[in-house]
Image (cartoon, rainbow, N blue to C red):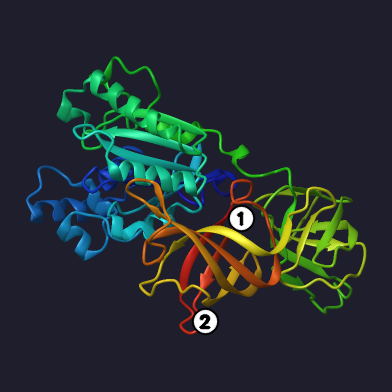
Amino acid sequence: MTESAPGYLDMELMRFTTAGSVDDGKSTLIGRLLFDSKAIFEDQMEAITSASIRKGDEGVNLALLTDGLRAEREQGITIDVAYRYFATPKRKFIIADTPGHIQYTRNMVTGASTANLALILVDSRHGVIEQTLRHAYIASLLQIPHVVICVNKMDLVGYSQKVFEQIRGQFLKFAGKLDIKDVRFVPISAKFGDNVVERSLNTGWYEGPTLMYLLENIHIAGDLNLVDVRFPVQYVIRPQSDQFHDYRGYAGRLAGGIMKRGDRVKVLPSGLVSKIKSIDMFNSSLDAAFAPQSVSITLEDDLDISRGDMLTGVKNGPLCEQDIRLMICWLNKKPMLLNGKYAVKHTTRDVRCIVKEVDYKMNINTLEQDYENREIGLNDIGCISIRTTKPLFFDPYRLNRTTGSLILIDEATNETVGAGMII
């Protein structure tokens, strides 16, 4: 389906990420999904066919569809996050193919931060290993609502139901310690397409859906917080034209809740209350808007509102504090400095902060909290406390992934050095 097809823009969008150990078949699985759902152009198919012949592969190596870097193709691994876009008659999809190596933890966090669903691949010959646990922990930390465990390479264990059930039991035993709401298991062979798009005759004992059926039908509309209104103001629209002489619109993207014309809203940080006069889009007005729509809001009163302020419901407002505790994933080679000063970007608000304390560092292999070695370096995840120069309007990350996340920026280099999830 192309973007010009009727209704394409109105189709529901699902973002999902893949994770798993090296050689578990993540890139092959994505290639199989694209191939079997007819989402590959002829020239792409010709290119990977000729590349497979040059490499001496048996048949067409579908992993080459996402392994775009030369180093990835040479080593047969994924290094950077590769994004792929495709659509079926039911949904649009954005896939983030993330690397499995421990030294690319930051890449996985980046690719998974906006995902509705995580596909975690497990090699049926090896079962649940340390990297499986690590990726499940990161999926839990990032509050990805749905997790599908793809038990891959079933062809190499004779499509054994016993092996599948053992892996299922291993993972469920561990998953009880994590905050994962919805876990599914699918036995697949990415290389041969078993249970990826079409049901496999080789797994007659498996009565569940195929992977593609899950991707098309898992309910994701309820993943967003549609109860608590959160509207970070991104820009104030003042056309200064004869037609819109008195127009003052507050543009932004709804981070939570539903806004209706006539609703009372509170403005932060001032605390003033007004009513919604109109909800506008480019060439139309709406009676209501919901997350994650981008709209322009006009109010009945002339209030002093600028970028970085937030419109919320009169009740159920966000927390408004300067002392904030968060889990941080460090993205930079230069370690985090205790008492170091960083710029903070949170929704549309820009402030500065100082790192007050490092509570502990996570041992990502054992999932234990390390209170001895608290230095946070590249790819490390830890719990820290910061103090900001101005209050932030935030929710705990588990309640709202948009208002509960922030990034730290090195002011000297302007590099993003940390991704934080507010506790």
Residue at x 26% of width, y 19% of height:
161
Residue at x 13% of width, y 42% of height:
59
- Location of residue 181 in the rendering, given as x and y in whole percent from the top left corner: 52, 34
In the picture shown, does residue 78 fall above or below 242? above
Give the amino acid at mark 1.
Gly
Spatial CA distance of label 1 from label 2 is 22 Å
Judging by the rendered image, the residue that carries numbered circle 2 is 411
- Location of residue 410 in the rendering, given as x and y in whole percent from the top left corner: 49, 78
Which of these two is toward me, 333 or 259? 333
- Location of residue 150 in the rendering, given as x and y in whole percent from the top left corner: 33, 34
Which of these two is toward me, 371 or 104? 371
- Location of residue 8 in the rendering, given as x and y in whole percent from the top left corner: 54, 47
Q: Residue at the far left: name it.
A: 56
Question: Which label's residue is closer to the chain start, 1 or 2?
Answer: 1
Q: Are marks 1 and 2 in contact (CB under 8 Å)?
A: no
Badge 1 marks a residue whose secondary structure is loop
Within 10 angstroms of label 1, few (less than 14), some, or many (20 or more) residues?
Answer: many
Judging by the rendered image, the residue that carries numbered circle 1 is 404
Q: Residue at the far front: name it.
A: 372
Residue at x 53% of width, y 75% of height:
339
Q: Is residue 64 left or right of residue 54?
A: right
Badge 2 marks a residue whose secondary structure is loop
Q: Is residue 126 left or right of residue 262?
A: left
Which of these two is toward me, 213 or 409? 409
Residue at x 35% of width, y 72% of height:
333
Give the amino acid at mark 2.
Glu
